[in-house]
Image (cartoon, rainbow, N blue to C red):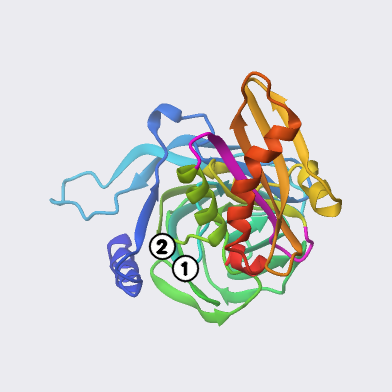
Amino acid sequence: MFGKATAIIALLLVSFAMKAAELAFEFPVEKVGQLPSDFRSVLAGQGTAGEWKIVLDDVPSLMAPFTPKAAGTGKRPVLAQTSRDPMDERFPILVYGGEIFGDFAFTTRFKLVEGVKEQMAGVVFRYVDEKNFYYVRASGLGKTFNFFKVINGLRSVPIGVSVEIPRNVWHEMTVECKGTRMRALLNGREVLPWLDDKSIAAGSVGFWTKSDSVSYFADAKIVYVPRETLAQVLVRDAIKKYPRLVGVKIYAPVTNDSQLRIIASTEGTEMGTVAPKEAADVLAERGFYYGKGDGIISLTLPLHDSNGEKVAAVRVLMRSFIGQTEKNAVVRAMPVVKGMEARIRSLDDLVQ
């Protein structure tokens, strides 16, 4: 079953450019009972947060056995969502924070384990925040496989098919995105043909469940075209050019609600998280924000586009020295900011 599906997935991945990268999401056995590294739990909708952790389960091998007597199943670590809050509009999500993806093919095996009200499992992709993302999900009780988009907290009507998805059986789903086009496969078969949507160009990926669904995930991986925005280039180049810097973050609005989020940082796991209040204050008012502590100073200043409009904010972290003052901190940070502004024409340049 899975050998055929894997072969189909391999064929579709060939369509990516030769520079494509692959990332496998591994769940180490020594982390059983814990949240996997580089992931964060979020909640869309209402109710309690999900309980995501690594557990042991019997998982059929993706490889065909060498002999008829060889074992095809063995216990190994998988990802599980185990909380059972039955609230209807409750969507526990586990987001991978290490990378932003534009074009990719994201594959995972999943199993619907338990659930009285719902038995669902899915993946989120091009995730910006809990109010802006796409997702594909399989429903065992509803017998459907559907695509949805959530924009500013409003969920679209479903696009999908009716299909049997038995409980306590491992299945496989794949989502492929190219530009504004996307499609989904179930057990190696294209069940949601290519559709076009321009709402979100890039974002994180992760795992999704609903209500009281207890769902398992395994053998998750993503093949993607590495994506580097100008904002990420500016952060990397600043760190390289100015050795005194400890860290750099750029904040900008990435959705229609204009909320500022981290769009580039020396700390990759911060990508997409909400900016602190001082970043919004810096953009709303004239001036800057200065902070000091533990031998480090931080300065948050506005970033201007080629028309002189404030389009983003940058936080510069530097080592302090004896006699460090707010005034000379600004003097130290301004070359970093001015160097960035010389390369920015508009907000779109930063985030695309």
Q: Residue furthest right?
A: 285
Q: Is residue 80 magenta?
A: no
Point 75% across, 42% down: residue: 276
Q: Which residue is mark 1?
A: 103
Mark 1 or 2, nearer chain start = 1
Q: Say if mark 1 contacts mark 2, CB within 8 Å.
A: yes
Residue 143 at least partly seen: no
Q: Quadrant of residue 333?
A: top right
Question: Is disc 1 placed on a helix, strand or loop?
Answer: loop
Question: Is disc 2 placed on a helix, strand or loop?
Answer: strand
Instruction: Please state which amino acid type lies under the numbered disc 2.
Output: Tyr
Q: Measure the alpha-carbon separation of dots 1 and 2.
A: 6 Å
Task: Give residue 224's mark.
Answer: 2
Q: Where is the C terminus found, in terms of image quarters?
A: bottom right
Task: Give residue 8's mark.
Answer: none
Across and down, in percent, residue 197 comes to: 61, 78
Q: Quadrant of residue 292?
A: top right
Where are the magenta residues, as a range? Answer: 242-258
Q: Where is the N terminus found, in terms of image quarters?
A: bottom left
Instruction: Please state which amino acid type lies under the numbered disc 1.
Output: Asp
Given residues 207 and 264, the one toward you in this image is 264
Residue 97 at least partly seen: yes
Across and down, in percent, residue 65 comes to: 19, 51
Point 42% across, 39% down: residue: 27
Given residues 348 and 257, the one toward you in this image is 348
| Relative height, residue 109 to residue 86 (above, below) | below
